[in-house]
Image (cartoon, rainbow, N blue to C red):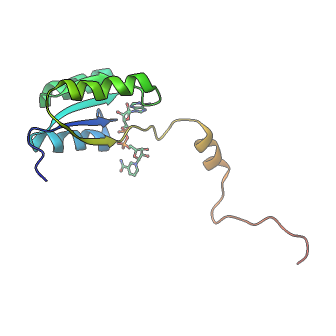
Amino acid sequence: MDLNGVSAVVSGGASGLGEATVRALAAEGAKVVIADLNEDRGKALADEIGGVFVKTDVSNEEQVQAAVQAAVDSGAPLRVIVNSAASAGRRGPWAATAARTTWPPTRPSSGST
Ligand SMILES: NC(=O)c1ccc[n+]([C@@H]2O[C@H](COP(=O)([O-])OP(=O)(O)OC[C@H]3O[C@@H](n4cnc5c(N)ncnc54)[C@H](O)[C@@H]3O)[C@@H](O)[C@H]2O)c1
């Protein structure tokens, strides 16, 4: 796949898997928009690779639209979207569920055996 001259949006692109993806896409010649909450890391990486940073919370539709618009405005055709934004330590419904879950799962006793 020829990525030279296309644009890409990578959410969570300031760190970890997203950062590695940003670097790989840039190395292939893509113009990359880094859409992330982390302004310091995102800006620094964008400067390093010649990309664009847009401060984005992926739970905010307007901010996501602004990140996509930045890719469109770059003039390069938008061909790649990578969603890597996440927070492993975030507390929420999933974390609460995971904390309560035992493995292997136990079945409630039917009382018959
Ligand atoms: N690193 C691994 O080996 C690995 C393996 C399997 C699964 N995962 C999962 O993949 C996900 C990413 O892992 P990682 O190691 O790249 O994490 P990371 O913390 O290094 O990077 C996540 C990025 O997402 C950004 N982010 C968090 N919430 C955001 C939001 N609401 N909007 C925009 N950006 C947001 C953070 O600022 C950060 O830059 C996690 O859910 C992790 O559990 C990671």
Residue at 28% x, 21% y is 40
Where residue 52 appears, x then y in whole percent? 20, 25
Give the farthest residue toward the bottom: 113
Of residues 29 and 90, which is closer to you in this image?
29
Give the farthest residue toward the right: 112
**If the picture is divided into quarters, which one holds ligand 1?**
top left
**Where is 69 relative to 23, above or below?**
above
Q: Quadrant of the C terminus?
A: bottom right
Determine if residue 37 is in view. no
Where residue 43 appears, x then y in whole percent? 23, 22
- Which quadrant of the structure image shows residue 32? top left
Determine if residue 62 is in view. yes
On the rendered structure, is 64 left or right of 74?
right
Residue at 66% x, 58% y is 102
Where residue 26 appears, x then y in whole percent? 14, 39
Residue at 8% x, 42% y is 4
On the rendered structure, is 39 left or right of 99?
left
Of residues 78 and 38, which is closer to you in this image?
78
Residue at 84% x, 68% y is 109
Of residues 53 and 106, which is closer to you in this image?
53
Q: Quadrant of the N terminus?
A: bottom left
